[in-house]
Image: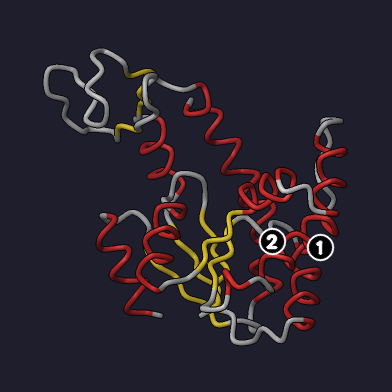
Amino acid sequence: MEIILFGAPGVGKGTQAKILAEKKKLFHISTGDILREAIKNNTELGQTAKSIVEKGELVPDNIMGGIVKEVLRSDRCKNGFILDGFPRTVAQAVILDTVFAELNIENVKLLIVGAEDSILIDRISGRKLCKSCGFILSKGALLIDNKCPSCSAVDSFIKRKDDDEEVIKRRLKIYHETTKPVLDYYNGKLTEIVVDGTQEIEKVTADILAKL
């Protein structure tokens, strides 16, 4: 099973990717993780990416596409994969098409975890982060004695600047501007699966598995 995953910031696509990867024995390809891995392992593409990152520049699409290709042809993806974070643009989608063709990867599914912006803004702006362990407390979640459910630290929750309402709105605006053309590009090319990401985590997972 081969899946490209899409979802707006805060919709929970990372959580679903991990659950799905475990249940279906698929490799979760997080582009941030594989980029850091390539740099750490000092691969040829990793060396090139490292020199670019150290200059504070974005890694070019062709380099990122090459790193994705290396992972896709590795044994880790022999049972399938969930590609998370690539492609983000039509140019990247074109590169990925070439990679799929070269590796004879067919029948890729496009999984979209959707939600209304207003719900995501309310969800993200209302959550807090434990400064001790990084645990994220959802809006409306109850605390016992102001203790973190993960590490038991007391009065440790803070609101991140990234979770400010105006910041979230900007992130969503960028997401829609860059993602819609990609989804339009794939329209009619790939099997599209859409699920409602505003439901409880277990219900979202159940819907994904049923539609797959």
Q: Where residue 134 appears, x then y in whole percent?
A: 40, 28
Callout 2 touching callout 1 (CB < 8 Å): yes
Q: Nearer the viewer, residue 63 or 46?
A: 46
The vertical placement of 169 against 154, above or below, is below
Three-letter amino acid code at disc 1?
Ala
Q: Where residue 47 appears, x then y in whole percent?
A: 84, 46
State the mark number for residue 87: 2
Q: Nearer the viewer, residue 26 or 137?
A: 26
Structural crowding at the residue carrying mark 2, measured as other residues with C-alpha within 10 Å and reported as few (<14), some (14–19) or many (≥20)? many
Give the labeled residue for mark 1: 91
The vertical placement of 75 against 44, above or below, is below
Q: CA distance from mark 2 to mark 1?
A: 8 Å
Structural crowding at the residue carrying mark 1, measured as other residues with C-alpha within 10 Å and reported as few (<14), some (14–19) or many (≥20)? few
Q: Where residue 48 appears, x then y in whole percent?
A: 87, 47
Q: Residue at x 12, y 23 (%)?
A: 144
Q: Residue at x 80, y 70 (%)?
A: 94
Q: Residue at x 55, y 82 (%)?
A: 191
Question: What secondary structure is found at the residue carrying circle 2?
Answer: loop
Please indicate whether residue 180 sits to the left or right of residue 168 in the image: right
Farthest residue in the left direction?
A: 144
Q: Where residue 29 appears, x then y in whole percent?
A: 58, 60
The vertical placement of 165 against 42, above or below, is above
